[in-house]
Amino acid sequence: MESLFPDAIGKVENHFLEKYQLNKIAPHKRTRLIASTFARHPIIFITRENPLEEEEKEMIRGTPAYKNILKKAYENNGCVKFFDQGQDVRMLTKEDFIFAFGDKGKAKIKALYSLGKEFNDLTGKV
C-alpha cells in the first residue's frame, strides 16, 4: 500500500485477511457492474457472426487480423472489445472503430450507420 500511496506512509495500517475472512466479505447490495463503461476510448469493437459461441471468439483471437487490431489499439492508447449490441451501442463514439467479422457483422455496421451512429469502419483495413 505504501509503495502505491506514498502520502499514506504512517497513516495507514495493513491487516492481513485470512481465507476465512475473505469468504465472509460480501457487498451490501447486489448491483450489476457494467465494466465496459470504464473502457478507454478509442475502443475497437469486433462484431461476430455468432456472439454466443465462445469457439468463434477464440478462433478470432488466433488470427493475424486480431493481432493487428491489438497493435492498433495499443498505438492509440485504446482498447479492444467484442461487440455486445445490447450495451455497447450507447458507448460507441465517433472516435471508436468497428471491425466486422462475417456478413452479420457487416450488416450490423450498415444498420448502425443508417441509424445515425458515427464511428470508423476498420473492416478490411487491418
Image: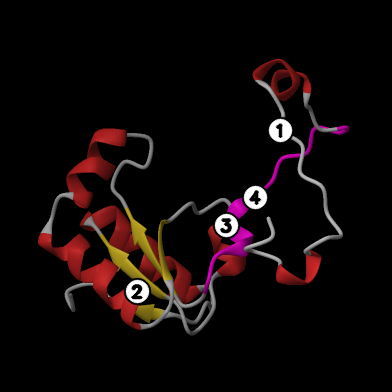
| Neighbours of disc 1 within 10 Å: few (<14), some (14-19), many (20+) | few
Disc 2 and disc 3: Cα gap in Å? Answer: 15 Å
Disc 3 and disc 4: Cα gap in Å? Answer: 6 Å
Residue closest to the eye, 108 or 120: 120
Disc 2 and disc 1: Cα gap in Å? Answer: 38 Å
Question: Where residue 25 appears, x then y in whole percent?
Answer: 78, 26
Q: Name the residue under label 4.
A: 34
Q: Mark 1 points at which residue?
A: 16
Q: Do the residues bearing badges 3 and 1 touch, measured as CB atoms within 8 Å? A: no
Q: Mark 3 points at which residue?
A: 36
Question: Where residue 93 appears, x then y in whole percent?
Answer: 54, 78
> As shown in the figure, which amino acid type bears the numbered disc 3?
Ser
Which image quadrant is residue 56 in? top left
Give the mark nearest the N terminus, 1 or 4.
1
Select label 2 or label 1 by which is in front. 1
Select label 3 or label 1 by which is in front. 1
* Highlighted magenta segment, given as a residue range: 28-40
Give the mark nearest the N terminus, 2 or 1.
1
Q: Do the residues bearing badges 3 and 4 touch, measured as CB atoms within 8 Å? A: yes
